[in-house]
Amino acid sequence: MYKLQIYESLKKDVINIFENFCEKYKEIIPKPFNEYSCCAQLIQNLRNDYFKFYQEEDYQLSFLYPHELFKNQKGLKKDKYKKLLESSYTEEEKTYYVINSELKKIFENLDKSIDKTKYQTNLSVKQLFNYSYFIDSQPRCCFCGQLLESSIKEDKDNKNKKEEYLHADIEHIIPKDQFPQFTLHPENWAPCCKECNMGEKRTAFFKDGTTQEKIDKYKLAIKALGLEYNKLHPLKLWNNYKITYNNSLKIEINNNLSEEAKKILSFYGIEHRIETMASHCYDILFNIIRHSDIRSPESLERLLENMVSSNWHEINDGYSLNNSPQIWQEFIESILYDECKLMALWDEVKSMNMSIF
């Protein structure tokens, strides 16, 4: 199957899983939670949000999950919701929590819910989704932009069958902890590198307000950032920064942005990602130098001149500076046009390659 066919087919499969969850919730949600009078209405609200949010710009959420009540209750997941049953929460609050937990469980176990025979693959559902996500573009992390590494998986039963897959996780652009209705929404998924999924993103979407108020702030913030909330790819957030590298990294943001817009940038940790990427410049530079035949200050200078506008940092290292190429360009220029820095770099090159001098 072509990537586009796989991508569209997987999206349909996930939507069907969600539909099945809504139709058979009494079989999926443990008793007595599924017997509460509020449960059927909450499931209907969940379904409405799922199908309308990304289609209707002014849609008001119906499934208003009380995230603040549960964020510190790590013990509630144990003993099959026994602690939750014994808690003082209302039936509605308990049911919200169980629905959220069951949706997360389905997401974590997609391989058990999707029949992969039609895809003729040994890849996991998430690997297959990540691979097919990049139809007409390079496979880059949705947050930091670095090129995602790929590997080949061999079929245990057929050694001649080999499949490529990306080393990537699926990130929820709108956090699933606070917005369970988008846990199984493919439009809310984007592949990201392991590093970004290990805690780069902040834990609090917005600290104050109801679920609806938080999403309203989100929509206003995204609009202020010049983006569309229902077509958001996190890499586009980088457009709101001006980044220069002279003697040190300088990150500037438009001060006219609203506080909500700045909080969104903070939530996705863009400044930290910029700093992380900039910190790789020296590593990338020395990796290139190690694979180049540098025998004089003049040859080092010529190499740097070529680097200013080249994409060698991606070819040699795999760590992309693509989101803001001026980081790389100005980093190289800061060395190239400063004789003291250039000679200091030459001394380091000589120390790396003492055997040829």
Image (cartoon, rainbow, N blue to C red):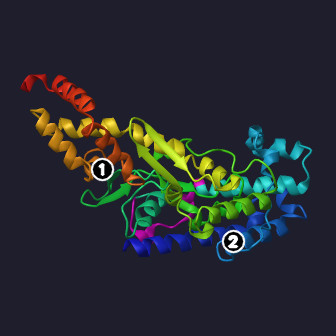
- Where is residue 106? Give x, y as percent: 63, 58
User: In the image, is 85 to the left or to the right of 290?
Assistant: right
- Residue extending furthest left? 357
Q: Is residue 28 among the parts visible in the rendering?
A: no
Whether residue 66 is in magenta: the answer is: no
**Quarter assignment of residue 86:** top right
Q: Which numbered mark, 2 or 1, is in the foreground of this view? A: 1
Q: On screen, 330 above or below 232?
A: above
- Where is residue 153? Give x, y as percent: 33, 54
- Where is residue 309? Give x, y as percent: 26, 53
| Observer-nearest of 351 and 20 | 351
Q: Is residue 220 among the parts visible in the rendering?
A: yes
| Observer-nearest of 104 and 222 | 222
The residue to which callout 1 is attached is 314
Per the rendered image, the range of residues in magenta is 108-122
| Observer-nearest of 314 and 5 | 314
Q: Which mark is on residue 162?
A: none
| Observer-nearest of 198 and 78 | 198
Image quadrant where one finds the N terminus: bottom left
Amino acid type, residue under disc 1 in the picture: Glu
